C-alpha cells in the first residue's frame, strides 16, 4: 500500500498569501495518477488537480500542481477567502487508492 | 449535468448490515466506474472499493474484503454498497464518486451518506 504523508498539518495564513502544500509518498507514484482535492465542512471533496499538474474544469489558475516520484506539491499563488479549506492528495496508480491525511488551511 | 444522488442517513446496531445506494444521471452509466470512499469524523477519506457498471467487475480494499459487496442495476443507473458486520469504527460519511476508467481520478461525487453504528 502506498502511504501518503502531508505537511504541514495546519497552516494559518492571510488572504493574498502564497501557499505551498506538500505530499510525500512511501514509494514512487506515476505522476499520471496523482491528484489534489479541496474539502469544505459538510461537503464532498472537490477535484482540483489530476495527473499531478492538470487543473480540473472550472478550477482557477491560481491553483497549480507539480512533482514526481515521491514528492508532490500543490501551490495556491494568492489565497482567496474561499480557499480556506482542507486539502487532500490522492494516488490512483495502484490499489488500494490512498489519500493523505490532509492539510488544513486556516484564516 | 452529472449527478450522483445517494440514499439517506442510516443508524444501525453493531453487527448489522447497511446498504447505501448511489443513483447516477447526466452521463452514460456504463461508461464510468463508481468508487466508494468513506470519511470518519475528523479524518481523511478512505477508499473502500470500486465497481464497473459495465459487467459488474469489482475490486475492494483488503481492509473491507469479506464485509463489503458492491452491485449495480443498469436499468435504474444505480450502484449499491452493502457493508456487513458493522462496528462502531464504521461510523462515517460514505461517498460514491465516478471515474472514467480503471486508473482514473474521482471526478464527480455524491452528497454523502452518514452511517452511524451504535452499540
Image: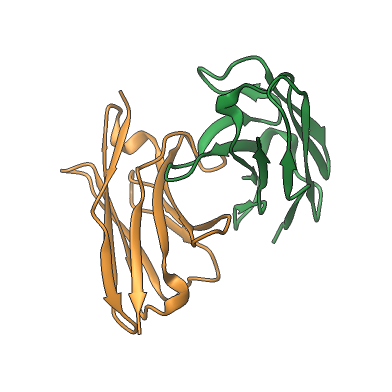
Chain colours: A green, B orange
Q: Quadrant of residue A73?
A: top right
| A75 to B84, vertically: above or below | above
Q: In the rendered view, does A66 fall on the left or right side of A81? A: right
Identify the residue at image location x=74%, y=40%.
A30
Q: In the rendered view, does B31 fall on the left or right side of A89? A: left
Q: Where does the image place residue A21, in percent across and percent down from the top left?
A: 76, 37
Q: Quadrant of residue A23?
A: top right
Q: Nearer the viewer, residue A70 or B15?
A: B15
Identify the residue at image location x=83%, y=41%.
A69
Q: Nearer the viewer, residue A105 or B117?
A: A105
Quadrant location of the C terminus of chain B in the rendered image: bottom left
Q: Quadrant of residue B68?
A: bottom left
Identify the residue at image location x=39%, y=48%.
B96
Q: In the rendered view, does A75 fall on the left or right side of B56? A: right
Q: Where does the image place residue B42, in percent across and percent down from the top left?
A: 54, 59
Q: Where does the image place residue B38, in percent across and percent down from the top left?
A: 46, 57
Identify the residue at image location x=66%, y=30%.
A51
| A80 to A50, vertically: above or below | above
| B70 to A68, vertically: above or below | below
| Residue that lies at the very extreme toward the left in this rendered image | B75
Quadrant location of the N terminus of chain B in the rendered image: top left
Q: Where does the image place residue A50, in percent across and percent down from the top left?
A: 62, 30
Q: Nearer the viewer, residue A100 or A32?
A: A100
Amino acid at each position: 500500500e502506498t502511504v501518503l504523508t502531508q505537511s504541514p498539518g495546519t497552516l494559518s495564513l492571510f488572504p493574498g498569501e502564497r501557499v505551498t502544500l506538500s505530499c510525500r509518498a512511501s514509494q514512487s507514484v506515476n505522476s499520471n495518477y496523482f491528484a489534489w482535492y479541496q474539502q469544505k465542512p459538510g461537503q464532498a471533496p472537490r477535484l482540483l488537480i489530476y495527473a499531478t499538474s492538470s487543473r480540473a474544469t472550472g478550477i482557477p489558475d491560481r491553483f497549480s500542481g507539480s512533482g514526481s516520484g515521491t514528492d508532490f506539491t500543490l501551490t495556491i499563488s494568492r489565497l482567496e477567502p474561499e480557499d480556506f479549506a482542507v486539502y487532500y492528495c490522492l494516488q490512483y496508480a495502484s490499489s488500494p487508492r490512498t489519500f493523505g491525511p490532509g492539510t488544513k488551511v486556516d484564516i | 449535468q452529472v449527478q450522483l444522488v445517494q440514499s439517506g442517513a442510516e443508524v444501525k446496531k453493531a453487527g448489522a448490515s447497511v446498504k447505501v445506494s448511489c443513483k447516477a444521471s447526466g452521463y452514460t452509466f456504463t461508461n464510468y466506474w463508481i468508487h466508494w470512499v468513506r470519511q470518519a469524523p475528523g479524518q481523511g477519506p478512505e477508499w473502500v472499493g470500486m465497481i464497473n457498471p459495465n459487467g459488474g467487475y469489482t475490486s475492494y480494499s483488503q481492509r473491507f474484503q469479506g464485509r463489503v459487496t458492491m452491485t449495480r442495476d443498469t436499468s435504474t443507473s444505480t450502484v449499491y454498497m452493502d457493508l456487513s458486520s458493522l462496528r462502531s469504527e464504521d461510523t462515517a460519511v460514505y461517498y460514491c464518486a465516478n471515474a472514467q476508467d480503471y486508473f482514473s481520478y474521482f471526478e464527480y461525487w455524491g452528497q454523502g451518506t452518514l452511517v452511524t453504528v451504535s452499540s
